Amino acid sequence: MTSGAPLIGITADVSPASARLVKKAKDSTVFVAERYLAAIKRAGAVPVVLAPCATTSAVRRLLSVLNGLVLGGGDFD
């Protein structure tokens, strides 16, 4: 990938702490399936994992620097 490669945001999914394989963990996990990252890289772009944002201004700021957006599979409301 070159330094001028497009930045492609990909939404992350959240797994509640109760669903974790490691029962000792108290925090939820934010994740993206590797297949999404690999596909973006194969297309010559740079994947940018987007954690859930609480504010509209944060979302707008992120979108202003990205060249594209992938809405990954998951449980979205």
Image (tube, rainbow, N blue to C red):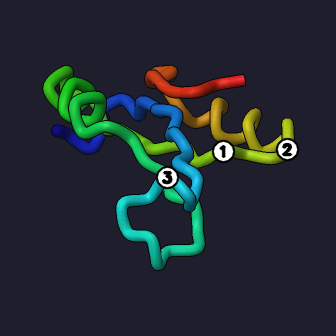
**Where is the C terminus found, in terms of image quarters?**
top right
Q: Position of residue 32 (x, y in %)?
A: 39, 41
Mark 2 touching mark 1, by CB under 8 A? no
Cα gap from disc 3 to disc 2, whole angstroms: 26 Å
Q: Position of residue 18 (x, y in %)?
A: 56, 58
Q: Nearer the viewer, mark 3 or mark 1?
A: 3
Look at mark 1 in the image and give the residue it sits on: 52
Q: Give the quadrant of residue 65.
A: top right
Q: Tag 1 or tag 3, which sits nearer the N-term?
A: 3
Q: Give the quadrant of residue 61.
A: top right
Look at mark 3 in the image and give the residue it sits on: 19
Find residue 55 and name its label.
2
Label 2: state its secondary structure: loop
Q: Residue furthest bottom?
A: 24
Residue nearest the viewer, comparing 34 with 17: 17
Q: Is residue 34 left or right of residue 20?
A: left
Tag 2: residue type?
A: Thr
Cα gap from disc 2 to disc 1, whole angstroms: 9 Å
- Residue 25 position (above or below residue 69): below
Q: Position of residue 35 (x, y in %)?
A: 22, 30
Q: Residue at x 64, y 31 (%)?
A: 63
Label 2: few (<14), some (14–19) or many (≥20) C-alpha neighbours in 10 Å: few
Q: Residue at x 52, y 34 (%)?
A: 11
Q: Tag 2 or tag 3, which sits nearer the N-term?
A: 3
Tag 3: residue type?
A: Ala
Label 3: few (<14), some (14–19) or many (≥20) C-alpha neighbours in 10 Å: few
Q: Is residue 28 left or right of residue 22?
A: right
- Residue 13 position (above or below residue 73): below
Residue nearest the viewer, comparing 50 with 5: 50
Q: Position of residue 8 (x, y in %)?
A: 42, 30
Label 1: state its secondary structure: loop
